[in-house]
Amino acid sequence: MPSERNSVVVSKSEVETFDYPFSASHHAKVDVAEQRTLQWVRRLQLAPDGRTLSRLKATSFAQLAGWLLPSADMQTLQLASDFTAALFLLDDAYDEGQLSTDPEAVERLNEKYLGELFGYVEADMSDPLTRGLLDVRERIRSSHPHFFLNRWLSHFQYYYEANLWEANNRKQMRTPYVDEYLMMRRYSGAVYTYCDLLELLLERPLPLEVVQHPLIQSVRDICNDILCWTNDYFSLGKELRSGEVHNLIVVLRDNQAITAEEAVAQLKRMHDDRVAEYQDVKEKVLALWADDAIRLYLDAAEAMIAGNQRWALAARRYSGLESLVAYAG
């Protein structure tokens, strides 16, 4: 049951409480990637008007790719930048407007996009997002093992299904339970697809017996939680102003009948526990595998965690003002 709602201020300076035992770094060629992605967006007509293009630029999509994959070669960075731009456009389509509360329409759209991506249905090339997503798929297919493409597509499928779950909740004006949200948040954020892209920094994607090992799965789960929970922290103002319930702070507040400030503090504790858990899992991983590929993958995971925070601090998508003032009532 919702608690009494108070306003909460999340200041940029407070993000210093998100501490990591590793540092972020930034790709040197993000400006090049951004210009090429904007050319790609225009060529495929992904942004139909100036307002959509301006909103896309405000997401700092290439900057995000550069923070998440600072050691990538130019081909992989460009792939990540283009995919990120398409994902932001897709995310806004699902989260805003009539589609956000229409699960039947979301289900139809899911069938269309997933059918096109998996090759089950003929692609509607008049749809700009179809053109963009298929272009990303074909670039992965042409330069990487097919098993990697299938792995990436399966994780992308979960993102679509999570959007359907969210649309059902919005239609019912329902705040999810905490455990339910924690599980589904891993899919709605599409972070597993980026965990897959980390493998492209290696000489070859991880074999099944490694990537499916419980310890590596723990690494991916922890990375996912940290990125999604900090995203919820940074986007709190934007989402409370729009009435969005799919935010960990809102879910904690409403399920536990606590204030927004108390929910923010709880998120920070949960975050710090996950960082400590990562350090423990990392030791176990390195004790089991001593090869350079695993160490490189861990380094990439750490760069992704720390880099995501650096992007969120600067991204106009979340923070156009010095402070994010979120009115909860």
Image (spheres, rainbow, N blue to C red):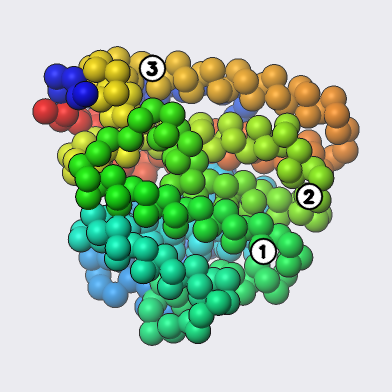
Real-space Cα distance between discs 2 and 1?
13 Å
Residue 266: which disc? Answer: 3
Q: Is residue 239 left or right of residue 15?
A: left
**What amino acid type is highlighted by mark number 1?**
Leu
Compared to 178, does 104 lie above or below? below
Q: Tell me where residue 239 appears, x and y as whole percent.
A: 25, 40
Q: Residue at x 88, y 38 (%)?
A: 291
* Cα distance between the residues tagged 1 and 3: 37 Å
Q: Residue at x 40, y 22 (%)?
A: 267
User: Can residue 20 be seen at all in this image of the molecule?
Assistant: yes
| Mark 3 residue type | Gln
Quarter containing the N terminus: top left
Which kind of residue does numbered mark 2 sit on?
Leu
Image point (64%, 51%), residue name: 196
- 2 and 1 marks in contact (CB < 8 Å): no
Image disc number at residue 149: 1
Quarter of the image with the C terminus in it? top left
Precedes in sequence: disc 1 or disc 3: 1
